[in-house]
Amino acid sequence: MPAGAENGYPSGHVLYRRLRKRFPRVVRGEGCWLVDDAGRRYLDASSGALVANLGHGNAEVARAIGEQAARLAYVNGTAFTHDSVEELAAEVAALSAPGLDRALFLCNGGDAVEAALKISRQFWAESGRPEKRKLAALKPSYHGNTLLALSASARPAYRDLFGDWLVEVHTAPAPWPYRCACRGEAEECPACSGAAVEEALLRAGPASVAAFIAEPVGGSSTGASVPRPGYWRRVREICDRHQVHFVADEVLVGAGRTGTWSALEPYGVAPDFQIFGKGIAGGYAPLSAMVTSRSILDVLAAGSGAPQHNQTFSQYPVSCAAGLATIRQIKAQGLLARCASMGGVLFERLAELKGHPHVGDVRGRGLLAGIEFVEDKASRKPFDRALRMVETLTEEAQAAGLVVWPQAGSAEGGGGDLILIGPPFIITEEEISELVARLRAALDATIAKIRERKRR
Ligand SMILES: Cc1ncc(COP(=O)(O)O)c(C=O)c1O
């Protein structure tokens, strides 16, 4: 198709991810910017899908990938090991929670979620407790699209069609103060304090539960909601008391996004499994990591001798080289500290939007911000879903040269409009000002369109 031509179904041969949309064709990325074939520039305020943490066009990572592909593109991970996976595993082990020092590398977040949940069940089976096989999770939540990961994801819009293919997962309400009946203010609120996790385990029968999976800071489902300081300590204590594995899904919020390598780190708590994905290789190659401890693997080593999750591209050399180069860039450029400090600037500038009549809440940590939009601020009433508020905002933002990550329908009753802002860690103060200015313009254009729709 020639440059500037229509890109979208039914033109061309791509099975586009939206069949009623036109797609700008991006030809290159430069730092925090994407450039399309018509020369239009887009400020990538969400690092794509919270992936491009280093920004676009990092020559060091590109070079490492090229060198790896030229030297050794692929070996079967069941037969061989190689330098990049050994070095990357050592880096990830040093960055992960204390005691978690064995890493399996896969390609997608959902792959790593499946691996953790299966290895948890395998651990219990090989420990002589095969009855421990149930799973627990928060609601709402998202852990991936493959069927076990989707089973653990309490998001009706993604699940409903496949309901009879999914396994039962026992849920507790997620800590989401803005949408909680207590508005985040009641000290002993079960959802906000973590006590609800114990209630869910007790309903399921804790002796039959293998693992509880959750995001340490809310990702797409609760829009960067940050649990209280004591939340994860309490959950850890509950999981310990009932002998249930705690799986921390850091696919979206880990790898530095919240200003520390792990979003769980500030809580001073170690999970049994920690999962990274998305930004772990900065988008330069598909990579995810499932990290666990020797105390779990020793049981398998003495039993079956092999974790029962494998995929063709496990420990894939080119992806491991990309992950290794990404971590080295994060260290060389001091990007964790930068993420924390630029996060301060981001939240200071985003605070300007709080006075907007339809901005209900702005929250998050580091360079991860969630902005929730409402019809009415006092009652926190969401927009009618039929108005497609957040979809319209995303289109208006794109038209204004700004990329944001939309999420719709997480609130009770299927409503709720929120976006995640998560720019590359290299973003400058000037770019943050530009981001907020473009977002405000897109928001005003959206509200004008919504008023127009309501009048019709
Ligand atoms: C918290 C979380 N876990 C898992 C996944 C699944 O990752 P992937 O899409 O790479 O399979 C996602 C994707 O958005 C996610 O946000």
Image (spheres, rainbow, N blue to C red):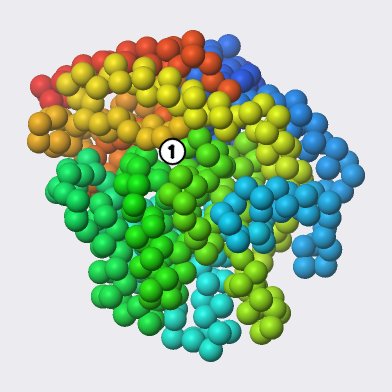
| One can see residue 146 in this view | no
Instruction: Please tell me which residue is depicted at 53% across the width and 13% down the height of the picture.
Output: 40
The relative height of residue 272 versus residue 338 in the rendered view (above or below) is below
Instruction: Please tell me which residue is depicted at 19% across the width and 56% down the height of the picture.
Output: 188
Instruction: Please tell me which residue is depicted at 56% across the width and 54% down the height of the picture.
Output: 97
The residue where tag 1 is placed is 19
Tell me where residue 168 appears, x and y as whole percent: 35, 72
**Quarter in which the C terminus is drawn:** top left
**Quarter in which the N terminus is drawn:** top right
Please state which of residues 56 and 16 is positioned toward the viewer in this rendering.
56
Please state which of residues 79 and 291 is positioned toward the viewer in this rendering.
291
| One can see residue 327 in this view | yes
Tell me where residue 180 appears, x and y as whole percent: 19, 47
Task: Looking at this view, name the residue that lies furthest to the bottom.
Answer: 128
Q: Secondary structure at mark 1?
A: loop
Q: Is residue 330 left or right of residue 416?
A: right
Tell me where residue 199 appears, x and y as whole percent: 25, 69
* Circle 1 residues within 10 Å: few <14, some 14–19, many ≥20: few
Instruction: Please tell me which residue is depicted at 66% across the width and 50% down the height of the picture.
Output: 94
Q: Which picture quadrant has residue 398?
A: top left
Q: Amino acid at mark 1?
A: Leu
Q: Is residue 307 left or right of residue 139?
A: right
